[in-house]
Amino acid sequence: MELGTKARTLELLQGQLHSAQVLPLVITSLLELAQAQEALLARIAELKSEKLIVRSSSKSEDTASTSNAGAFLSLANIPADDTKALLEAIEQVGASMPDPSDEILIQPMLDSIALCGVGFSVDKESNAPYFCISYDTSGDNASVTSGSTNALEHFVQYRGAPCNDPLMARVIAMIQELESIFAHKALDVEFAFVKTGGGGNPVRIQLLG
């Protein structure tokens, strides 16, 4: 596989990962919104989610050669049954990007988040062989979807060394699986652990981008 835009990469990975899941998604653009609004709304309805997140997926963002996390708009907690609010969110996210053909990514809004963050497969400053993970345990994924660096905690692990943190070990396993799929060793990956089951433990990991 080859890395593409955030949206197209997630689309390629649906059902392909052992270490994580990819949420259902709709990919659109301002051009499609202008030309086929009703068909677009029908596709979004198939997500069957009460709340949605509308995210940027520009050609100049999060590709194999560029990483402009947070450069463009993302809007969360959009009511799926409020057509006016949904269309306005799509228009605003589209308008934040430089090209009307740039992709707009629409997915169900995650709830019950136990931990979310961004993981780097190398040190982003020096390219040294360390997994570097910044994460937030507040339950708010805004720092991830906006590309914010104001994460509450940081974790660094030398490549090849055993990882004693069970959750961080799962993030590293996900990054390594993605490295194998894309034959690429300089990745940054957005993720979230979601609470499931009666015990409320974070047992499912979602790949966000």
Image (tube, grey):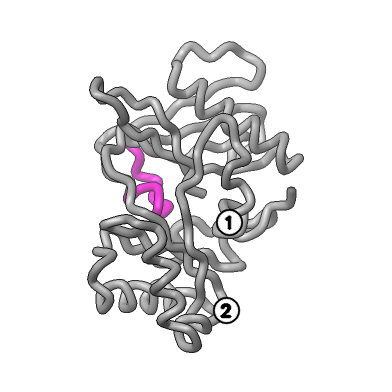
Foreground residue, 123 or 197? 197
Q: Tag 1: residue type? A: Asp
Q: What's the distance in space between the residues labelled 2 and 1, CA to CA? A: 16 Å
Foreground residue, 6 or 86? 86
Question: In x, y percent, where is residue 21?
Answer: 50, 39
Q: Which of the numbered marks, if any, corresponds to residue 62? A: 1
Question: In x, y percent, where is residue 32?
Answer: 51, 81
Dot 1 crowding, Cα within 10 Å, few <14, some 14–19, many 20+ = many
**Residue 117, quarter of the rendered image:** top left
| Circles 2, 1 touching at the beta carbon (< 8 Å) | no
Foreground residue, 15 or 72? 15
**Residue 131, quarter of the rendered image:** top right
Q: Which residue sits at x=39%, y=74%?
A: 41
Question: In x, y percent, where is residue 74?
Answer: 38, 63
Q: Which residues are magenta?
A: 142-152
**Residue 166, quarter of the rendered image:** top left
Q: Which of the numbered marks, if any, corresponds to residue 14? A: none
Question: In x, y percent, where is residue 156?
Answer: 51, 25
Helix, strand or loop at mark 1: loop
Q: Which residue sits at x=55%, y=30%?
A: 19
Q: Which residue sits at x=76%, y=40%?
A: 183
Q: Main secondary structure of the magenta part?
A: loop
Q: Is residue 7 above or below residue 81?
A: above
Asked if the magenta segment contains residue 75, the reply would be no
Residue receiving disc 2:
101
Q: Tag 2: residue type? A: Ser
Helix, strand or loop at mark 2: loop
